[in-house]
Image: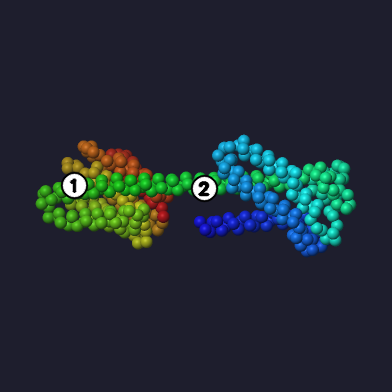
Amino acid sequence: MFQMRAYNVIIHIAGWLIFLSLPLLFMTGQNEGRQILSILSSSYYWWFGLCYIFLFYFHTYFLVPQLFLKKKFIGYVAILVLLLVLVFYVKPFDMLFTNAPRAGGTPPPVGDMPGMIPGLPEVFEPGGPPHGERGNQIDIISIFLFLMVIALSLAIEITQRWRITEQRVSRAEADRANAELSFLKAQINPHFLFNTLNNIYSMAITKNENTAASIMKLSNIMRYVTDDVTDDYVSLQSEIDCIADYVDLQRLRLSKKVRLEFEVSGELENKIIAPLILMTFIENVFKYGLSNHEQSVITIKIAAEQKSITFFSRNKIFPVIKQMDRSGIGIVNTKKRLEHLYHNRYFLDINTDDGFFTVQLTLQG
């Protein structure tokens, strides 16, 4: 914040230095150094500068926020017209040009007078223009500078307000995305743990000798879910360890009619992935790809390539009783998470051709 304010102050100072240097460029002749010092020592020069500096900041910090942005256009236009009339009569640039000291003490040539239009009668005498006659001329440059200062002030203020609005919208969208992502995680985690606990409960009822090992694997999974899943990204190795424990838990309850092909390949180190992004698809494999009466093959492959992570799963679709079926919700939520975390950096293809449920997912970077 401090750096931004300092930057704005420097920009304003540089802008006004450029603005105040313009009269010096127009009014200096052969003896430039002496003329510049003479002009800088003139009170008319500083009156000219302060006049437009006041107009700029009065318009920027009072007229725009208090009248223009509040849609009080009648008052806004009335004050602008009043300021224009004052500039018309005060003639800041005309006063500077006609009264600022010049090299040799000579007045400016009549043809160089601001606001003079070729063909009009000359009103300045060699000794200097009488104030009364100078007042009859229109100071075009002062009016032009007034309009330019007001237009620049309005453009800067509107641009700044637009930028602030854009930042607020972006921040609101980011906050909404984070809140939605947290909600999606909260939906996925209980669903995942609920199914796993049901599996261990069934093993405990049948007094399966692998119950203790299964509880340890579940403990590892719960530790991973509670400690690491709070981040948007985790190490790929941690995610694979969680998936391997989950597959081992599922493997314990598989019958001889099921052949499970689980394969992990590639370099897992120094790679990250969104946590539990693959778990919904793996859950569906075991939910819809098992049958107590028919042979089935379940295929799960994960490959870590140099710049991408690929996932493939395939299982035969068997009819199941849909009691409190939340798999559809899980897939929808996973798609939303992919859109949030891998926008334009992922490819997902899900199809059910030939009675098989196939998922192909590629995550870039």
- Is 209 rendered above or below residue 316? below
Left or right: where 62 falls relative to 288: right
Near mark 1 (Cα within 10 A), the count class, few <14, some 14-19 or many ≥20, is few
Question: Looking at the image, which is closer to me, 296 or 97?
Answer: 97
- Is 17 rendered above or below residue 296? below
Q: Which residue is mark 2?
A: 164
Q: Which residue is mark 1?
A: 198
The kind of residue on which mark 1 rests is Asn
| Residue 266 shows in the view | no
- Is 161 rendered above or below residue 11? above
Left or right: where 6 falls relative to 272: right
Name the front one of labels 1 and 2. Answer: 2
Q: x%, y% of residue 92? A: 74, 49
Picture residue at 15% right of the left edge, 47% below the top: 202
Question: Looking at the image, which is closer to me, 243 or 11?
Answer: 11
Left or right: where 60 falls relative to 218: right
Kindly state the secondary structure of the residue where label 2 is placed: helix
Type of colouring:
rainbow
- Among numbered discs 1 and 2, the one appearing first in the sequence: 2
Left or right: where 93 falls relative to 311: right
Picture residue at 33% right of the left edge, 44% below the top: 333
Picture residue at 33% right of the left edge, 50% below the top: 277
Q: x%, y% of residue 179? A: 37, 47
